[in-house]
Amino acid sequence: MRIFKMMKGVRPLVLGVSLMAMGKTATAQAFDPVTMDPARDSAAPASVEELAFTSGGARMNGLMYVAAGRGPHPTVVLLHGYPGNERNLDLAQALRRAGVNVLFFDYRGSWGSGGTFSFAGAQEDVAAAVRFVRDTGSARKYRADPRRVALVGHSMGAWLAMLAAAADSTISCAGALELGDMAQIGVGMNASPAVETEFTQYTRWLTEPGAPLHADAAELIASLKANGPRWTVAANAPRLAGRALLLLDNDHNPTHAATAAALRQAGARLTADVWHTDHSFSDRRIELQHAVVRWVRTSCGFGG
């Protein structure tokens, strides 16, 4: 009772001010770029910028999610799948709030970008996107650090991210979300007529007039069948030694175990996990954003 009386008057006010200050400090320390908006930087605000760059003589349409602040900011090149219905732009927003620029684009011949879509061409498109990000003019315009570039892809984009990192030793960080190893489909089509029939039907549907992909279905099928063995992520694993890699799949992904084993054996710095969800992480989007932001900050060293 005496203690209660002592706290009456001025002391509760002091205590209240102290608790408010503690609360503000805790809030500042606990900023979560997935679920919280940062204070606006009026001098260098966050923005979304329309852009275009060239690959194989064709115009690639894209967006740059520019992080707030003068930077220079690291950049994640975000790669969509086949054809790219899940674009993961909620992930782009979370990464931007975490202080990371994000380049999203459509491969040539997909979703209105110029040219003709092909699997070999898409690999070239990723390399062109990296060159665009590292260009002096782009770095200046988007307040970007050309030395810090990572790749994160979903489904086919995950496959492209791994192949691009294997082909470019300057890319130290690549993330694969629900890996769709298209080369494994090529291997499967060579082994099973049923696999070829199913994938051919889907590819023809994706390449009909007005469909997302401007391409020849037969050429796409032939390309995967001819190049399957040398285009698999496992076959390219030795060139990924020492890289920081993320392999996050669902529990129905047939390639996860073998791919993870090949990457570990090659000496990659692999973060791997399997979740009970669907191909698009439909019921775990917040958790997905947390996982990728955490990996980009810790494994890629992109601050925050």
Image (spheres, rainbow, N blue to C red):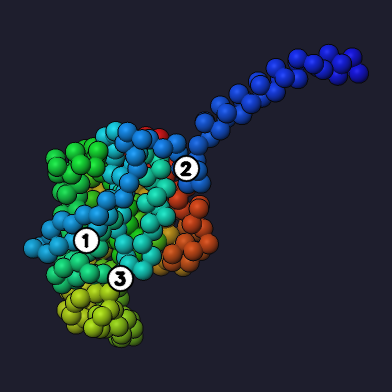
Q: CA distance from mark 3 to mark 1?
A: 15 Å
Secondary structure beneath label 3: loop
Which residue type carries mark 1?
Answer: Asn
Foreground: 183 or 4?
Answer: 4
Residue at image point 35% right, 43% down: 46
Asked which quadrant contains residue 106, the reply is bottom left
Q: Quadrant where the C terminus lies?
A: top left
67 left or right, relative to 239? right
Of marks 3 and 2, which one's residue comes earlier in the chain?
A: 2
Q: Which residue is mark 3?
A: 83
Asked which quadrant contains residue 71, the reply is top left
Foreground: 239 or 83?
Answer: 83
Foreground: 289 or 165?
Answer: 289
Residue at image point 31% right, 36% down: 44
Identify the mark at residue 298; answer none if there is no mark.
none
251 left or right, relative to 82? right
Please identify, in this view, whether the residue under mark 3 or under mark 1 is nearer the observer: 1
Asked which quadrant contains residue 279, the reply is bottom left
Which residue type carries mark 2?
Answer: Asp
**Is residue 267 visible from the viewing direction of this image?**
no
Of marks 1 and 2, which one's residue comes earlier in the chain?
A: 2
Q: Which residue is mark 2?
A: 37
Which residue type carries mark 3?
Answer: Pro
Q: Residues within 10 Å of mark 3 (few under 14, many from 20)?
A: many
Q: Residues within 10 Å of mark 1 (few under 14, many from 20)?
A: many
Q: CA distance from mark 1 to mark 2?
A: 27 Å
Q: Quadrant where the N terminus lies?
A: top right
* Percent x, y of residue 74: 29, 40
Q: Which residue is mark 1?
A: 61
Q: How many discs mark residues in the rendered view?
A: 3
Secondary structure beneath label 1: strand
Secondary structure beneath label 2: loop
